[in-house]
Image (cartoon, rainbow, N blue to C red):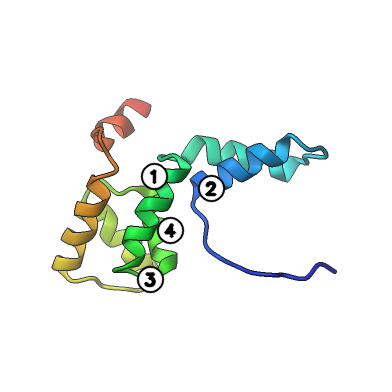
Amino acid sequence: MKKILSEHYVTIAEVKEIMAERKKVPPFDFEQEKTLDYAIKFARLGKAEAAELQSKLAEIVPPALAVKIADIVPANAELLKLIFLQEKMEPEEALLIQVLAIVKEYTPTDIETVVREER
């Protein structure tokens, strides 16, 4: 049995990079391939951007929530509220505005337009 040395939250962008490196060293099994496919499909930011965003958010929200927000990169307050509600938190309007202002720094394109075009 393997011993867990440490645990920490990682963004989808970091998973993508880890799995891409892991793929270079066989064996790379079915579950790992599916994980890499998922990460490629859903990572909205690069590893460095996601880590920077996560770090800024972790100053004002719990670490697990900071990772979720960095992964999803919500474009509006309604989506952000849903992320908070999943963690059983009801944020004040000021916190929503503060989080959205930080997230906006990492979304140079209009996410709503990108989502519509993907459909």
Mark 4 to mark 2 CA distance (whole Å): 11 Å
Kindly state the secondary structure of the residue where label 4 is placed: helix
State the quadrant of the N terminus: bottom right
Disc marking residue 49? 1
State the quadrant of the C terminus: top left
Amino acid type, residue under disc 4 in the picture: Val
Disc nearest the viewer among 4 and 2: 2
Mark 1 to mark 4 CA distance (whole Å): 12 Å
Neighbour tally class for label 1: few under 14, some 14-19, many 20 plus, Cα within 10 Å: some
Neighbour tally class for label 2: few under 14, some 14-19, many 20 plus, Cα within 10 Å: some
Amino acid type, residue under disc 2 in the picture: Glu
Mark 1 to mark 2 CA distance (whole Å): 10 Å
Q: Is residue 73 left or right of residue 1?
A: left
Residue 73 x, y percent position in the rendering: 33, 48
Neighbour tally class for label 3: few under 14, some 14-19, many 20 plus, Cα within 10 Å: few
Instruction: Tell me, yes or no, if residue 27 can be seen here.
Output: yes
Residue 33 x, y percent position in the rendering: 69, 38
Mark 3 to mark 2 CA distance (whole Å): 19 Å
Residue drawn where x is 65% and y is 42% of the image:
19
Residue 49 x, y percent position in the rendering: 39, 44
Residue 69 x, y percent position in the rendering: 36, 55
Amino acid type, residue under disc 1 in the picture: Glu
Disc nearest the viewer among 1 and 3: 1
Give the mark, 4 or 2, whose residue is nearer the N terminus: 2
The reply to whether callout 1 and callout 4 are in contact (CB within 8 Å) is: no
Kindly state the secondary structure of the residue where label 2 is placed: helix
Residue drawn where x is 32% and y is 34% of the image:
115
Instruction: Tell me, yes or no, if residue 119 can be seen here.
Output: no
- Residue bearing mark 3: 62
Relative to 60, is 117 above or below?
above
Q: Nearer the viewer, residue 51 or 61?
A: 51
